[in-house]
Image: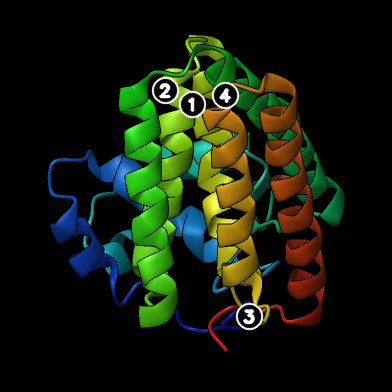
Amino acid sequence: MVGANDNLESVFAEFGEYAAKNEFAPMRELIYQYMRDAIIKRRLPDGCHLVEDDLARNLNASRTPVREALRKLESEGLVKHHRRRGVEVRQLSVKEVSDIYDLSIVLEGYAARLLAENVTQEILDNLKRLLKNMKATLAAEDRNLEMQLHQRFHFTIYEACQNKRVEALLKTNNDYIQLFRAYTMQVPGRMEHSWEEHERLLQAIEKRDGEAAEKCAREHLGVSKEAFLRQWQENPDPES
């Protein structure tokens, strides 16, 4: 983690590689996504001053996409403008994190219920395949692949629930939930428990039991919320 006035070079050292892997995305979106990740993971700590010229130099970008990214981060409450001090990082509060989880708990439970009541064999087979691959990552201790499969599992539920508004809201919130998982996966045994929670959810969906599916989905995110809040406060740096 860097201090509020430290050089930002270390924080943005891997941006070039990140941008190369996502070469077709707009620069403003790449900068926004990268900085949001850095803020939530506290590599850009609370109170860190962000100067457009410095950011543009470290990101090898013009000031326009940097400014657009900062505006988007401000709209999410992750940075704030001061009349005299400029732009400053603002960490999410415990209340804000809880609110993000609570919204996802309600919506994801509803999406799971909708899916269970209308699931097709094709969707079931896809979820089973993803869950099987997720289990393989446990033995391999491949956390990065587990994260990707986890997101694909949940996105499959969102996309198949047949409610586009719920899908859109969940996908927006999932960006945060995925970042929060960088902390929960540090808890011993959490990856294994998470897989078991997904297995129970899939069993409920396969039985076409909407009530049970909603309960499983809500319980899974509820446990994730408690694990994250505990780990986030005890260990502020997920990379340590």
Numbered mark located on residue 237 in the image? 3
Which residue, given by chain and number where applicable, does mark 2 sit on?
159
Q: Is residue 141 visible?
A: no
Question: Mark 3 or 4, which is nearer the eye?
Answer: 4
Between disc 4 and disc 2, whose residue precedes?
A: 2
Q: Name the kind of residue labelled 1 in the image.
A: Tyr
The numbered disc on residue 158 is: 1
> Which numbered disc covers residue 169?
4
Residue beneath the point at 70% across and 56% down: 90
Which element is circle 4 on? helix
- Asked which secondary structure carries label 2, the reply is helix
Mark nearer the N terminus (1 vs 3) = 1
How far apart are the two marked residues, 4 and 1, measured between alpha carbons?
9 Å
Front residue (pair 173, 148):
148
Query: Could you tell me which residue is drawn at 45 percent across and 52 percent down?
Result: 150
- SS at circle 1: helix
Q: Nearer the viewer, mark 4 or mark 2?
A: 2
**Label 1, residues with CA under 10 Å away: few <14, some 14-19, many ≥20:** many
Asked if the residues shown at circle 1 and circle 3 are in contact, with their CB atoms under 8 angstroms apart, the answer is no
- Distance of label 2 from label 3 (alpha carbons): 33 Å
Sequence-wise, the earlier of marks 2 and 3 is 2
